[in-house]
Amino acid sequence: NFILTQPNSVSESPGKTVTISCTRSSGSIASNYVQWYQQRPASSPTLVIYEDKQRPSGVPDRFSGSIDSSSNSASLTISGLKTDDEADYYCQSYDNNNRLFGGGTKLTVL
Amino acid sequence: QLQLQESGPGLVKPSQTLSLTCSVSGGSMSSSRHFWGWIRQPPGKGLEWIGSIYNSGSTYHNVSLRSRVTMSVDTSENQFSLKLSSVTAADTAIYYCAREEVATSWYFDLWGRGTLVTVSS
């Protein structure tokens, strides 16, 4: 199995753009889709990106996902930051019937 | 709108078995596109996948927990269940049930609110 590594925390100001990375330790990032979840304090996670770059219904287009084979990583980009975006964000992928989560990134909007 | 709700004891003694049930309402568990999964989150820590079960009863488990995990499904009652044996304090966590989309990728598109299970004597 592989490990998904995320930065512990990122911070940015309202209205700005922030990118959160998720690096796969072995195997190609393009081999298996990557998903992203948002978890606000005291709430359960919600899906914000699936299949690398697809947005579920109801998720604003300020949220976008991508993968970069050169760095073997996936990224979640949030533009036009709002204070309501302050949350923990987790990437997730799978391999050999296992589902794997990254360690999570705390986004602070200040 | 489909909803999931976890239920079970909030306190389990060390070495005993943790038992949780997830009740699915507002829809059927019979879809071929979905598995039904369990994910946990120790206080202040990240998410850990425990396992997933199909409506036929086929299961996949996290390798690190496999020997202690038992999952079952009852589609007639629209419920699925988790048993985790020989628990220790390290199993203290919020336990979530979730619907897992498996048609083209594997991801959790609907989550329950979670239930806190504390392992303590």
Image (tube, coloured by chain):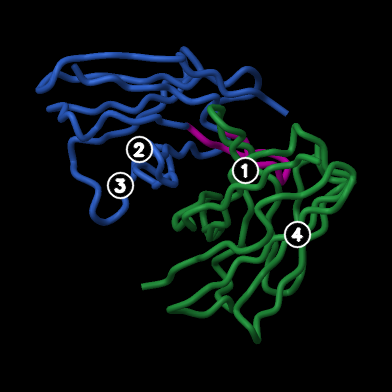
Q: Chain of mark 1?
A: B
Crowding at mark 1 (Cα within 10 Å: few <14, some 14-19, many 20+) = many
For mark 4, what is the residue? B19
Q: Amino acid at mark 4?
A: Ser
Viewer-closest of B81 and A57: B81
Q: Are marks 4 and 2 in contact (CB under 8 Å)?
A: no
Q: Quadrant of the N terminus of chain B?
A: bottom left
Q: Which chain wears blue? A: A
Chain letter behind tag 3: A
| Above or below, comparing residue A20 to residue B70 in the picture | above
Which quadrant holds residue A95?
Answer: top right
- Residue at mark 2: A40
User: CA gap, disc 4 to disc 1?
Assistant: 13 Å
> Where in the figure is residue B37, as x and y percent of width and height?
62, 56
Circle nearer the viewer, 3 or 4: 4
x, y (%) of residue B115? 57, 52
Spot occupied by residue A31 in the image (x, y as percentages of width and height): 57, 34
The picture quadrant where one finds residue A86 is top left
- Any idea which chain is the green one in this picture? B
For marks 3 and 2 on the same chain, the one whose residue lies earlier in the sequence: 2
Residue to which mark 3 is pinned: A55
Question: How far apart are the alpha carbons under marks 1 and 2?
Answer: 16 Å
Q: Is residue B85 left or right of residue A18?
A: right
